[in-house]
């Protein structure tokens, strides 16, 4: 059953050194505030999981939280590269980063399989590509009816699943609207889950009976963090801060400049 | 006739290849511009799908990211990302998928993963995204990219997504039933796979370029089709719609926040 | 692309003798009007597919349309047995009926696999049951990671998928609200699809961006059939005719009485 | 104390076994009455899920079918049926699943498929529905049924859903991690699996019945627990809430149409 706690307490209670932590949000609803609180609390040796690492993982990788990255597309969307991620991969700074690299379809299927309590996902993928050569977790099964060989990946069952959402009611039921990505799957696939929301309301009032709603009993901790997805966006609340995504390209190019920015904005020691 | 840039020529050329009844899996950048240009000109009923889950979207301005709010707001409906990849892409419902490429070889295999060795790369690129499954699940694949000698290479350093395979025969041998990259549109020309070998050959030159310039900018001994034509330059109408779209886009993205 | 046609033309154009035809609607939105039009047009040797055969298949089986039934629960919900289905199974009247019997989970997964273009579905099911003994299509695969053996079923890819829905816009986009069952999966899994709706509207106006909507280009034929799901119900339009479900228990007990009712209500010859 | 029927005793007894934090997969009939009685008495926060996709439903009247509109209207949210079976049931999120039975054996294996041979049945029953996967995916299974010699049999004619297996050992041998049928509630008594053998033994007698009557109505030589107790009769409050629920239900179903 979801408990409402401060962001600090939520992260302290759910994220431990060495955990596999998924922070999802497909462009929309990226849980930046949680990522930055994980940095503040100095978590180490995390396996970070995200389809699109985006700025949030660039920050966490640059601050040395991650030992391993599970991902499918690592860029600054519409801008260019993730410089901190590149520096970790190419130069091992601030520490080496192991890559477990997939396609979008593989990760989406792996979350869905995790949510469904299955040990693996089957899909028609990776045909003729080099990815299975560099990722041993990509395997195959044979269809028992047609003999077709299909790709498999292990299901993703993170220790902690983190998402941002529009709002919760007082019982901790959470509504997600718009580009819903893998938000439901990540919460249901994870051992522990942490959800940040823009606000708490008396009546959840989902617009449709079939709206995407997570019952409070599927969530461990909820923190109310207005603008908790900035610089990404929250449909109905605020728009994407495209200017910041451009700025980040500059901020993150240089190690010192990056560390200065983090120390200034997150209060982390240099 | 207005002046126009090579990128405008590329975008217009890609837009023209789209039909009113196409269902397109759209990527950010040139593909998004091309698909929306088609929608705003000769293909008003074209269906545009972005991998963020937005189906039948009609954005007024081009998205900066694959999951911009504009896409969901103007879509017929927005589904989850697992549903998008399972029911819509893998389900075989997409007629045209767009891909970009950091490297592309003569058999239209694409690399967006690394330059150099995977474990000790010279350049780390963003990675696969949706490309491996887009490349084999869509009816046809259109590739748009800048035409440079570093981009159009003899052999890609890493096969992120399958074209026709290392020798041009593997796509068929692997049992992939979709047509694959039927069209590669660069800022210099259009390349298409030769029927017998699946090797990309130049089939249309954009105005202002020459075979020699294309040979210089291509990393394999590129051949030219016997039926080589010249690409029709962008019309006034096409340029006007495209530029107006870009103007609205820039204005919107400046105004946001 | 969906075309709007009369019910008669829609059935004539999409359903052929010998087809595998799924008519779905989980209690809600059962496409009765289509089932009855299939009876009127005298289609034969159909493989009928439905999780819960309900009265609609009782009618079609009793009128001799079906050679084969794929199902998971065959009763008159809240009332008792389906007498026509029983008569076909036990006595071969009006003709023998082959049963291909599954669980709900199996059929739901098989539709989803069909919609996803996969040849089979994997799930944790049928453990320790006798169903695999009597249904050879239930098989197993081994998880390539854990070695767990999981159940498989072939994906369902009907020749024709039929559903009822609330409404369509003039472009043929269809909105489904409430208990959505497998409606989306059936349409996407089928080679041809036929949708009946209560009404056509200028603006579809789905209540949520994430409402269940089928684009017109995924549908072959749409017929406007008000009360087309009677005696089942349509959320927002009319309620379930529970009295008729009770009456059916009487009507369907006796072969003559059944045929009289059909002839009277459908204009079929006795 | 009011008079009450054996079925009321069964329903009240099932309701009492439910906890406020349970997540229940509810079937139509007695299970639905029991779950909603629990919700309206000692377990106001209990989560009720019906296989039609309705999650956290709080029906004012009992549904006649598993997919009544009342369920969706009063639910927190309604998901598709594939999602229900994949993410919610198979996902291991259900603490208590209810099953009924046409036949149940001493190891709580259940038959709802056929009486007699499958290919030449004496009676054709409705079939499996959700039962095979409910039986193995829910934390615990509660069975409610009328106690008759034709229902509680030595050996079921067909295993539609697994209890503890033909010898009581197969559930464990097959690697099923959930507890299975921990409670069988009939109109005469409560049976629970014995720890060592998994054989169902009578653990509680409803008022008004006798061990002899239970022996007569059971198809195997049924045993009684050393700790046999008597079931607490329904309280005035329980009966009042249950009867009011049934009254509202009948009124609503008469009024509909």
Image: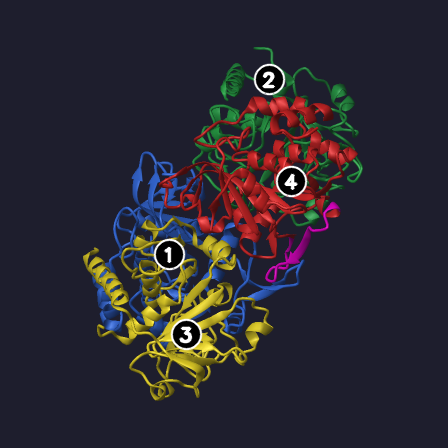
Chain colours: A red, B green, C blue, D yellow
Mark-to-mark CA distance, 2 and 1: 55 Å
Frontmost residue, D248 versus C173:
D248
Q: Is residue D225 above or below residue A10?
A: below
Identify the magenta region.
A134-151
- Pair 3/4: label in front: 3
Instruction: Mark 4: give few (<14), some (14-19) or many (20+) Cα within 10 Å.
Output: many
- Pair 4/2: label in front: 4
Query: Are the residues flagged by discs 3 and 1 from a single subunit?
Result: no
Contact (Cβ within 8 Å) of mark 1 with mark 4:
no
Contact (Cβ within 8 Å) of mark 3 with mark 2:
no
Q: Which residue is mark 4?
A: A72
Q: Which residue is mark 3?
A: D184
Mark-to-mark CA distance, 1 and 4: 37 Å
Mark-to-mark CA distance, 3 and 4: 49 Å
Q: Is residue A186 above or below residue B217?
A: below
- Pair 2/1: label in front: 1
Q: Which residue is mark 1?
A: C26
Find numbered disc 2 in the image and state the secondary structure of the residue it sits on. Answer: loop
Chain under numbered label 2: B
**Disc assigned to residue B233:** 2
- x then y, percent, for residue D164: 51, 75
From the viewer's perspective, tell me whether residue B107 is left or right of residue A162. right
What is the number of callouts on the image?
Answer: 4
Query: Are the residues flagged by discs 1 and 4 from a single subunit?
Result: no
Q: Is residue C228 above or below residue A261?
A: below
- Pair 3/2: label in front: 3
Mark-to-mark CA distance, 4 and 2: 37 Å
Q: Is residue A147 magenta?
A: yes
Find numbered disc 4 in the image and state the secondary structure of the residue it sits on. Answer: loop
């Amino acid at each position: 059953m979801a408990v409402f706690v401060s962001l600090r307490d939520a992260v302290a209670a759910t994220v431990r050194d060495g955990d596999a932590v998924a922070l999802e949000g497909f462009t929309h609803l990226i849980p930046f505030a949680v990522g930055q609180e994980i940095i503040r609390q100095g978590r180490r040796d995390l396996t970070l999981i995200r389809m699109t690492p985006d700025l949030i993982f660039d920050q966490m990788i640059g601050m040395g939280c991650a030992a391993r990255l599970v991902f499918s597309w690592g860029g600054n969307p519409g801008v260019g590269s993730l410089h901190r991620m590149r520096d970790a991969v190419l130069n091992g700074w601030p520490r080496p980063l192991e890559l477990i690299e997939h396609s979008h379809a593989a990760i989406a299927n792996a979350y869905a399989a995790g949510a469904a309590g299955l040990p693996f996902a089957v899909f028609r993928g990776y045909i003729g590509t080099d990815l299975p050569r560099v990722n041993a977790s990509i395997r195959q099964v044979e269809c028992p009816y047609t003999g077709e060989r299909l790709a498999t990946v292990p299901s993703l069952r993170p220790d902690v699943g983190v998402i941002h959402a529009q709002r919760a009611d007082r019982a901790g039921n959470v509504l997600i609207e718009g580009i819903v990505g893998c938000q439901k799957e990540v919460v249901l696939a994870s051992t522990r889950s942490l959800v940040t929301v823009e606000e708490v309301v008396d009546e959840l009032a989902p617009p449709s009976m079939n709206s995407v709603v997570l019952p409070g009993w599927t969530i461990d901790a909820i923190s109310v963090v207005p603008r908790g997805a900035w610089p990404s966006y929250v449909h109905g609340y605020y728009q994407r801060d495209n200017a910041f995504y451009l700025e980040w390209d500059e901020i993150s190019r240089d190690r010192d400049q990056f560390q200065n920015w983090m120390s200034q904005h997150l209060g982390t020691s240099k | 006739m207005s002046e126009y840039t090579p990128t405008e020529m590329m975008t217009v050329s890609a837009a023209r290849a789209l039909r009113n009844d196409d269902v397109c899996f759209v990527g950010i950048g040139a593909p998004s511009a091309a698909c929306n240009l088609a929608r705003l000109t000769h293909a008003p009923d074209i269906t545009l799908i972005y991998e963020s889950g937005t189906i039948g979207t009609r954005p007024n301005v081009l998205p900066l990211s694959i999951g911009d709010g504009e896409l969901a707001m103007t879509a017929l409906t927005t589904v989850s990302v697992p549903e998008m990849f399972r029911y819509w892409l893998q389900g075989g419902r997409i007629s045209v998928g767009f891909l970009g490429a950091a490297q592309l070889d003569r058999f239209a295999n694409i690399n967006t993963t690394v330059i150099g060795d995977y474990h000790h790369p010279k350049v780390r690129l963003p990675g696969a995204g949706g490309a491996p499954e887009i490349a084999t699940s869509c009816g046809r694949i259109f590739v748009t990219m800048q035409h440079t000698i570093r981009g159009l290479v003899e052999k890609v350093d890493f096969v992120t997504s399958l074209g026709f395979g290392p020798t041009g025969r593997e796509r068929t041998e692997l049992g992939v039933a979709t047509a694959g990259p039927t069209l590669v549109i660069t800022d210099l020309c259009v390349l298409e796979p030769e029927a017998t070998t699946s090797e990309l050959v130049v089939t249309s030159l954009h105005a202002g370029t020459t075979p020699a310039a294309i040979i210089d900018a291509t990393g394999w001994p590129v051949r030219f089709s016997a039926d080589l034509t010249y690409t029709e330059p962008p019309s006034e109408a096409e340029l006007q719609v495209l530029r107006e779209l870009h103007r609205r886009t820039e204005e919107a993205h400046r105004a946001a926040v």
